[in-house]
Image (cartoon, helix red, strand yellow):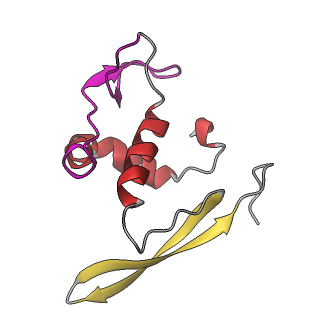
Amino acid sequence: MESSGQLGDKKLVRLLARKSVTLRSYLKNEFDLDLPVITHCGGHSKARTFRNSNDCDKPMNIGWYLMNGIYNKLKGFDNFQAIFNCKVIKLLTNNINDNSTINGVRIQYVFNDGNLV
């Protein structure tokens, strides 16, 4: 959580940790992002961070690898818009027949000093 400047969502971080196997499969199938290596990152008590393999000894930043791969796929869609320097506050949904679909995102912009607008 410290690496996010305290802007990370604690519940989301826990969910991603619990569903890591499912998430890895989804990222591979939907975005061709492969995470075959488990590494021991600073501050962790054991190896638990999945990352991609690369040709050099220094691992690629996992956040950049994931965001870049997802962004590169999504930018091909006409209705995709990337908005930077913001925090997602809420996903706006429609509930139809017990199915939720996301139809928008409520955001808050972040200044360079990390404060929310």
Which x, y percent locates residue 111?
77, 56
Q: Quadrant of residue 69?
A: top left
Quarter of the image where the N terminus is located: top right
Provide residue 6's location: percent of width, then percent of height: 64, 46
Q: Horizontally, is 100 left or right of 45 in the view?
A: left
Is 117 situated above or below 54?
below
By secondary structure, the bulk of the magenta-drawn segment is best described as: loop
Q: Residue at x 35, y 86 (%)?
A: 94
Quarter of image, res 59: top left
Return the x and y of residue 47 as percentages of the image width and height. Answer: 36, 20
Q: Find the residue positioned furthest to the bottom.
A: 96
Question: Which picture quadrant has residue 77?
Answer: bottom left
Residue at 34%, 20% (x, y): give it: 54
Q: Is residue 35 left or right of residue 59?
A: left
Which residue: 78% across, 50% down?
A: 112
User: Foreground residue, 67 or 3?
Assistant: 67
Decide if residue 3 is on the left or right side of residue 22.
right
Q: Position of residue 48 (x, y in %)?
A: 35, 26
The image shows residue 17, relative to residue 85, as above or below, that is: above
Residue 12 or residue 104, whichever sits in front = 104
In the image, taking residue 107 as reference, residue 51 lies left or right, namely left
The stretch drawn in magenta includes residue 65? no
Where the C terminus falls, by quadrant?
bottom right
Q: Which residues are magenta?
A: 28-56
Residue 24 drawn above or below residue 52: below
